[in-house]
Structure formats: C-alpha cells, structure tokens
Image (cartoon, rainbow, N blue to C red):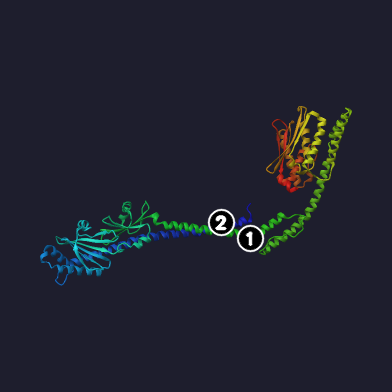
Amino acid sequence: MKSFKTKLFLVYSITLIMLTITISFPLYLYFNKQIKENIMTSVEQLAGNSASSVSAQLTMFKSITFQLYNSYDYTRSTLANYLLRKQTAPESTNALQVFKSIDNYMLMMMATYNSIERLNLYLNNGDRYSKHFEYETTHDEWTTIPFKEMADNEQGGIVLSSLDNGQFSLSRMLQWGNYKIGYLEAVLKPNTLIDSNLLENMEGSSISILNRNQLVFTSHSNQDEVSQMLSMVQLELEKQTGFAEVNKQGIISVRQMTDLEAFSVVTLAKKNSLFAPLIVFRNTMLLAVALIIIFSVAFYYLLAKLLTRPIASLKQAMNEIELDNESELKIENHYKLDEIESLRRSFQKMNTRIKESMDERVHFHTLQLQSHFQKLQAQINPHFLFNMLSVITITADRKQPEAVANISRKLSQFMRYTVSTESAMAQLGDELQFTENYLNLMKARYLHRLQFEIDVPEAMLGISLPKLTIQPIVENCIQHGLRDEIPQLNIKLKGFITNQRFDLVISDNGVGMNVEIQEDVMRRISAYVENIEYHNLAQYPSLQLGGMGLVSSIARLKMKWKQQFSFAISRNEDGGISVTLQGSMLQQEELK
C-alpha cells in the first residue's frame, strides 16, 4: 500500500505531466507547421526573387539591343547602320564617326542601367569595343569570343553565361537583315542575378537557371548532382505551379518562369537538410518539456514531503511509543497546523486509555502464564521417577555404589533444574547440560540401546531461550522413536552458525512419523501460537513435558523470537525425524 506522501506526489506529478503534454504537444504541432510553411515560403520566395532578377536583366538586355537597332543620331543613322557600313564598305566609313557613335551608345546604356559592369561589342571584322562603367571606351581586336558558338546556335536569341569569377554575362548575335554584324555582350555586376546573401540564409538550397530545360547555371558546387536532382523532380517541374513541391525522394523543388519563356529559375533543396531547424526545434522543445517536468516533479516532491512530514512524524512517534513511557507525545509541527496539533492531543489521550487498559490485561495475562509455567515445572512424569528409582535399586543390588551415587546426583540435578522458579528464561548451554543429564539418566536405563551426541559451537551456548525447551523435544525422540524393532536409538544435537543465523538440529534414527502425524503436529503448533497471541488462555492445550512437549517447545520459541524464528520438522532417509530450530545471532546480541 502506497504512503500518503507517495500518493500525493504521484497525483501532482501525473497531473503536471498530463497538463504539460496537453499544452506542449499542440504548441509543438502549431510551431512545427509554421516553421515548415515559412521554410517552404522562403524557398518559393528565393525562386521568385531570382526569377524576377533574371527577367529584369533579360528585359534590360533586350532594351539595349533595341537601342542599338533603333536609336538615331543627328544624321538619321542608327548604330547598326554604322556597324553594317563599316563591314560592307569600310573605305567609305568614317572610323572616328563610328567610334563616337559606339562610345555615345555605351555611355548612354551605362548611365541608364546600373547593373552593367562592362559592355562589349564584337564585330565580324575583328574589332572589339569595350566600355567599363568606371573607364573610357576602348578599341582593340579580338581573337576568340567565348560565347560565339552558343550565340550562333541561338540565331539572335539571348545567351546567358556564367563567368569564372561568379559573374554573369548576357550576349547575343547582331544581325541586320541578312548581314551578320557581330556580337553584343553585357557583363553584369556581382549579385545582380543571384543574391548570395539569400543563398547563405537558405543553407542547403541551390538556385539553377535553365534555358529550354538545359542547365545554364547552378549555385551548387556539384553540377552533376544538380543534374541528377533535376531529373528526379522532372514531373514536379513540369507543373510550373510556382509553389514548392516535395517528391518521394525528399527533394523540394520550385520552378519560376521568367518573362522570356526560354529561361526559368529552379530552386532545389533536400528535405532533411532544409528541415534541419525543425529537428533542432523538436529537440529543444523536448528538452524544455523534460526540464519543466523534472523541476516541477522535484518541486512537488519537496512540497509533498513538507506537507506529509508532520504525518510521518506522528507515525514515527506511534511506532516508537512505549506503554510505560508517560512523557508527552512530541510531533514535528513547524507550520503550526491546527489539525496536526488536534491529532496529537487525541492520540495522546488514546494512548493513555490504551495504556491503562493494557496494564490490566498484561497483569492478568502474566499471572496466568506464570501459573501455566509453574504447572509445567511441577509436572514430572511419574513413570520417569519410578523407572529411575528402579534403576537405582537394581544398581544398588549389584553392589555398584559409584553408579548409584552418579545416577542419584544426576537425578538430583535434573529435579533441581526442573523445579527452579528463579527465571522463565535460560541459556542454551544450561539447557544442553540439563538435556545431557536427562540422556545420561535414560542411558542408565536403556544401556547400549541409547546413544547420544551433542556438538554445539561455543558461540551458541549464550543464546537465550525459554526454560525447558530442548529436553521435551529429546524426550519425544525417546518416547516415540525407541521401539522393540529399533536395536539402538542414536540422538544427535548439532549446532551451526551461517551468515549471522544459527541452526540447532535435533535428530534420531527411530521409527519416525508418517505424513498425517507430521501435519497434525504443525496444525497444533499454529493453533497454540494463535491462542497465545490472542490471549485465549482458556484454549491453551495442556502443557506437558511429554506428549505436547514438541508443540509447546516450538510454540514458546516462536513467541520469544517472533519473526526471526523458523523451524522445520522432516523425516530422515534412514528413519527417524529431524527438528531444526533457526534464529538470528543479531537478535541474540540485542536481547543481551
């Protein structure tokens, strides 16, 4: 049965745990959902912002090209006209006028569009005009054009290229009618198309730019891995919803189309990597809940301990109270609880009434036990005395005075110990000496038909036990074990000490007892102890040195040693019975 403190602690703790789980679990689900939605929204915004940047730069580059074809100077000529004449009729073209027209065009584009770092114009005749936003326009000759093959394949379409320094360039082939003029390239400033700061905030994500589903650029360090991931999310990309999708392989993808249909921006991320903050949040949540529960449980334990301490103090006082102690009952009541003080006073009054009642019952019970013990001491089997007197007479007739004196002396010691009323308790050494006298007297009668052996360690001789306990058991061995069919009865008394426990074994090789008799003896012992415990003195079996000797000896030992005492009655394989008495050496030290 659980204590009140334990029950109080368990009720508070379980209530707290249930309340904490009831509150924290929905909160966890809510915040988990919000974090997931925020992450997916961030992925979508990353793709959308990147697609917007690409669209803006593509539109800007289309505008630059438009200005090249359609912006007229004071001579009503466009830059495309100058470039065409420079290639078809170079001898009639004013080189200075062409350079001035190109320089004005590049200055105007640089001033209009701040995202351009360098503008390059490659002519088919080998001339190159270049303008950096911080420097003047330069004129030289080109040897190779990196994007030339791609621009030729696009037939005037825009080519997006990623440069080694992390920048991007937009280029296209220039054509006037059937004549190829050259190539136009705009090198963009860093972070114009892809904002590296956004990528840093979205760790685990990558941005890829596709041109007609062909990978043009990726922010991921491993292009092959990105190509493989793109093939795995092909079905999701074809939807072109603009919303983040998660496929079976755990890859999150978003595709945003640019204003130029050929180009699109795709954001890719692995779910496990992108949702790593969710794992951190979950672990943090679990740790926080665990700490709340641990600290709260500890608090409730201390609270339950404080609330139940006066009750525990009362229980301890009740356990330690003695009937002969008339001092006032002291109970810890630091918090001045009226209920505890009222309980203390009531218990004090009850203790006084019980003491007065028990004094009367104990006095009456003591007188009755003394009367029973005196009857036991006074009972000397007449047959035993007649037999001993007959042995003395026969020995005297045989002219054996020393034997007569020895038997008389032992009989005198036996009767003196039996009728002595100084104490109801004796030491095991005295009991064994008394039993040895009895066995010597019986041996004088049965001669060679009776043999005995006493082997008990010296450490056991000081054990305290009720008087006349061992001899009745030995007497039972002779009365019930020695029959005509037994040529010689061997009685052994042996003692053992093991792990602070002692065993005293009394055994014989007589006729023994059957199962029915053994069960009857056990039943009578239980009834005897029960009657004594409930003070049913009128129901006591008749106490005798014989007959009920075994029962009375074991019952009195049980009453004396209580829970520390145990016994066993067993039948020996070679005949006879063994009675084993067990007790605690530690208890014997306390009794001393």
Q: Dot 2 lies on which element?
A: helix
Q: Residue furthest bottom?
A: 74
Q: Check the image and name the residue furthest to the front.
A: 140
Q: Nearer the viewer, mark 2 or mark 1?
A: 1
Q: Residue 57 location in percent, x, y?
A: 27, 64
> In the depicted view, which residue is nearer to us: 230 or 186?
186
Distance of label 2 from label 1 (alpha carbons): 18 Å
Quarter of the view holding residue 241: bottom left
Along the horizontal axis of the image, is 40 left or right of 187? right
In the image, taking residue 400 as reference, residue 273 lies left or right, namely left
Q: Secondary structure at mark 1?
A: helix
19 or 104, which is in the foreground? 104
Q: Dot 1 surroundings within 10 Å: few (below 14), some, or many (20 or more)? A: some
Tell me the kind of residue under disc 2.
Ile
- The amino acid type, in three-letter code, at marker 1 is Leu
Tell which of 86 and 387 is nearer to you: 86
Q: Which residue is mark 1?
A: 307
Could you tell me if residue 528 is visible in this image? no
Q: Identify the residue position indicated by label 2 in the image.
A: 14
